[in-house]
Image (cartoon, rainbow, N blue to C red):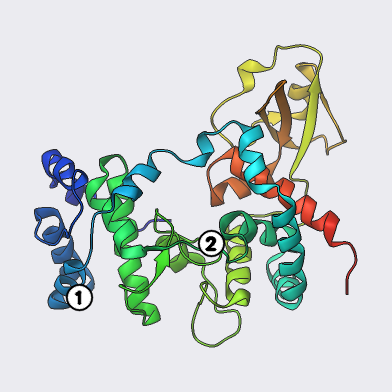
Amino acid sequence: MHKYNLMSLVRSIPLTLFLLLSSCTGTIKDTESVHAFIEQMVNKHQFDESELDDLFDTVEIKQDILKKITSPSESLPWYKYRKIFLTDARIDAGVQFWKDNAAALAAAEQKYGVPPEIIVAIIGVETQFGKNTGNHRVIDALSTLAFAYPPRSKFFLSELENFLLLCRDEHINPADPLGSYAGAMGLPQFMPSSFRTYAVDFNNDKRSDIWHDNSDAIASVANYFAQHHWQTGKTIAVPVTTKYGNYEPVLKNDLKPDLSIAELESLNLIISRQLPFDSKVKLLSFEQPQGKELWAALDNFYVITRYNRSPLYAMAVYQLSLSILNKKGAFP
């Protein structure tokens, strides 16, 4: 997804400079690492150096961003994580969002093969249907994490590069967009590289506006899923029960389905519904107050984890999609 290798730039940034930057709040322009980044954008992409100098004069390291990046909600146990997203208010808002955007959702499903409830659930989990798209300047968020957070500097330097490119392509002032503490943007919370790869101009107004245009946001999510090989009409995940505790060896960090149905059954695991015998599944365990909850996740569940590489996130999206679909009923 990320086309540019900035490893050589990262190596040029001294660790002492990272530590200095992360210990203060203020502008970051007059640092070796920022000068090197600006020089790269000028030489590689023909940006105007004086304009970038002026932009980075306004950029600040944000301590609250550094704090948040070290304590994501995905570190919670499932039963606490689930309560954040599976609320009556979010389900009701999802039903209303579906009703308000029924035409765009139907058109996106027809073009990309992704069901409306999944698209709606993604936007619901990400931003509560546009209610919370973030209040950090994207340029501050990406710069803070690129220049003052060593563990992910390579990734965020690439995202900062992509952000400046998309702003040029879309004729956006890079000082203006707001987003999450990690620099995710708009209703679907696309990172800049995802925007440049998957964002769609669905209403043909010559802009891919995931901030204000629901049809563009809906189609962009659908396109993301389609490009990651969503299988139309296929099962996402099914509950699994067991009478024996001998399944632990197949609980692995990799999320790609790797077990056959026969292998699953050989572990004395019982699937709650019949699946095609040639299916591949991933056995996942979710923490509940009284023990572990087991699920067999299929390829479409894996696709959801390409949006956010957390099984908790993917399960929240899946269960929210079912709740919204159930609550929606059959309105016109």
Residue 204: % across, % down: 57, 86
Which mark, by number, is residue 17?
A: none
Would you identify the image quadrant in which residue 242 lies?
top right
User: In terms of depth relative to the viewer, which is nearer, 160 or 145?
Assistant: 145
Q: Which residue is found at the position 55% from the left and 52% from the top? A: 307
Q: Which residue is found at the position 71% from the left and 54% from the top? A: 231
Residue 228 in the figure: left or right of residue 274? left
Amino acid type, residue under disc 2 in the picture = Asn
Residue pointed to by mark 2 = 132
Label 1 element class? loop
Residue 146: % across, % down: 27, 52
Residue 191: % across, % down: 44, 59
Amino acid type, residue under disc 1 in the picture = Gln
Label 2 to label 1, Cα distance in Å? Answer: 35 Å
User: In terms of depth relative to the viewer, which is nearer, 176 or 199?
Assistant: 176
Would you identify the image quadrant in which residue 267 lies?
top right
Residue pointed to by mark 1 = 46
User: In terms of depth relative to the viewer, which is nearer, 81 or 286?
Assistant: 81
Residue 41 in the figure: left or right of residue 70? left
Relative to 158, does residue 108 appear above or below in the rendering? below
For marks 2 and 1 on the same chain, the one whose residue lies earlier in the sequence: 1
Residue 45 in the figure: left or right of residue 243? left
Decide if residue 4 is in sight here. no
Relative to 175, does residue 184 appear above or below in the rendering? above
Q: Which residue is found at the position 43% from the left and 56% from the top? A: 1
